[in-house]
Amino acid sequence: MAVTLQTELSRVLGPKTAAGMADQLGLHTVRDLLRHYPRRYARRGEMARLDDLRVGDRVTILAQVTSVNSRRMRQRHGTITEVTVGDGAGSMKLVFFNYKHARLTHGAWGLFAGTVGTYAGSLQFTHPDMYLLNAADENDDDWARALVPIYPASKDVSSWVIQKSVKLLLDGAGGLGSLVVDPLPEEIRARHGLLSLPAALLDIHRPTTVEDVEHAGHRLKWDEALTLQLTLAARRRAAALEPGTARPVKPGGLLDAVDAALPFELTEGQREVGQELAEELSREHPMHRLLQGEVGSGKTVVALRAMAQVVDAGGQAALLAPTEVLAAQHARGIRELLGPLGRAGELDGAADGTRVTLLTGSLKAAARREARAEVADGRAGIVVGTHALLQEGVEFADLGLVVVDEQHRFGVEQRDALRAKGSRPPHVLVMTATPIPRTVAMTVFGDLEISTLRQLPSGRGGVTSSVVPMGEKPAWLDRAWARLREEVAAGRQAYVVCPRIGDVDGPDDEPEDVDGAPENAGGKDRRPPLAVLDMAEILRAGPLRGLRLDVLHGRLSPEEKDQRMRAFGAGEIDVLVATTVVEVGVDVPNATVMVVMDADRFGVSQLHQLRGRVARGKHAGLCLLVTETRTASSTGQRLASVAATSDGFELARLDLETRREGDILGSEQSGRRSGVRLLSLLEDEELIAAARAEAAALLATDRGLADYPGLAAEVAALATDERAEWLEKA
Ligand code: ADP
Ligand code: MG
């Protein structure tokens, strides 16, 4: 039987091993196994790092037996065998009960895998899995020098079983060269100094030196990056060829009116991006653009001007907000700005104007019917709503532009759904205030063109942030409330944000949309996070007594939410105690204080977003991150970084880093990591950029990948792979 990359592992390996690999590791074919790369390489000398290990970590070590001791147990029946292993740099104890391994003798080298425990103050493994290396016919020194691959393993398929299985493939008849065809075109390999695929696979699975691993890894990352970029480039290309409707600028219309009504000068960035959008909207292919800009950088105006252009050209524009509160706020803001021009058909409306229609799920039946009718017959030029707007199958007369506001979790799939709206796909503008590191932009959002607003409108007060460690320095919390009172006394307003609503038990009271906090942030033994309703009571009765205080959270009806936001905006409420519903886009320029309770329960980007709610006007803002976490802990440090940095890009990076699992000495974890195997969004920026350029060049002609069947196959495989899921995630 000729083995190929597609051959099922069950035909190459024993049935039990193959079943274990399929069920527990998701490895089905020869290709899967060859692409199952070692997590790390064990080598002598690493045991010096055993100090870093914590009880409970699963690790594999390469070590030599230095002593074996068996004795009868006093309390119980049977024997206990204590084996000391070391690697010249460190040592630890292995403990076995009623067990004696004939080959476990002084001087033997082996791989030992187990869960770290302690006994009498020193680290030990109890009944570790082990694989004794065949020292009989080899020199001990070989093992002392060797790099032993440690694979992501599972309960029934140990690292060394994988190693043996891979060996079968590497050493099979004809060698790897006959099994693996390199999909990478020779020119690309030469241009970037990359190993051939067979050579890279050989070196990653069986390296002699650390350099081997590096070179091989670099080449294999290229495969991942290029396949990904080809997929994205194909999407961009397909999108660019889609027929759309040109919506060119028409002077003397709504756009000019908007410009005349703006109470400020546009920033240079706003003008530049505006120009970019204006040109793209004038083309006969739909725009697919991401507009990123710090909180408060003035994205809304940019979007509004694009919407006005589309209305002037006879089309309709939809603005989608993530929450009803925001949708209502947008509709209100746009109506105010447009004045009579936004009230066509009403008594005081301008005849040449349009209508701004708010269409949300909570409208009463009659109002909703009326709104739908306006949208369907085209009277509504600007339609504001939540995502439900699109899902509910609302009919548009002529949808020309969809703007998605503040939605960084808007995946490729939803964007595709949007494009399917109407006979001709509308132009699409996605806006996000979560700065996106370049590599993420090139991957997760790789099918979009990107514009960035770097500059904040001038005259902003800026935000000062501090951590308030209420466990270590309770007095600081009193000081925090005092500061808040001072601001209110000076006529300003404040938010107090809590992770939870409170008042009921059960699933309804899960933290509201708390996103991106490290996984261990909600350990079982911790008290529940502070709740809005409790906090409001405490503040009313104590530290903030006498202030006008109200609450805002997701359990209120949309009318109540809107009414409270409106009251806060109008200055009728001093302090709004809220969940993260205030996170996105809420705009009350007079609010200057943001107190985040249990700040450690929030993710880095989320804190940055929250902070962006204050100092949107001319007054300086204050953000206080209140936490019980110790300052020295990693979570404490994370909060300190948020307080110290106002650069959203820097924080987005930090966010990515904290989301990754810590990995000392390759703590084993069964199952595969989702996503690409070797490529790192954080570290491989250059490589990703180079692959992106190559992908664009490869697809520049109409032949596509026709001349590169190997690459085409890789791209096809990605489409069906679980990795495709990764594309959906931001
Ligand atoms: P974001 O990018 O966070 O969505 P917004 O569009 O909500 O920001 O703008 C934040 C605030 O700044 C709003 O009150 C808006 O009216 C104001 N703003 C926008 N552009 C300018 C500008 N060029 N000069 C002064 N203020 C501006
Ligand atoms: Mg906004």
Image (tube, rainbow, N blue to C red):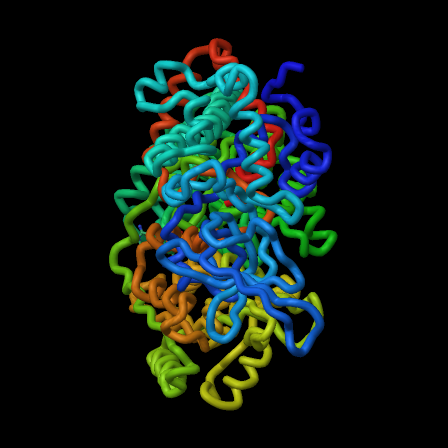
Residue at horizontal 37 percent and vertical 23 percent from the top: 195
Residue occupying the point 54% across, 44% down: 152
Q: At x 35% / y 42%, what residue is drawn?
A: 452
Q: Is residue 244 visible?
A: no
The residue lying toward the viewer, choosing from 218 and 255, is 218
- Give the percent coordinates (x, y) of residue 374: 63, 41
Residue 351: x and y, percent? 51, 40
Find residue 419 and report its horizontal and vertical position in percent.
57, 31
Q: Quadrant of residue 726?
A: top right
Vertical side of 355 occupied by 362: above or below: below
Q: How many marks?
A: 0
Out of 30 and 446, give the one closest to the viewer: 30
- Please report the residue visible at 58 percent of the width from the left and 56 percent of the height from the top: 128
Q: Is residue 498 above or below residue 305?
A: below
Q: Nearer the viewer, residue 570 or 598?
A: 598
- Work out whether residue 691 or residue 205 is closer to the camera in this orientation and state it: 205
Q: Quadrant of the N terminus?
A: top right
Left or right, 61 with reference to 126: left
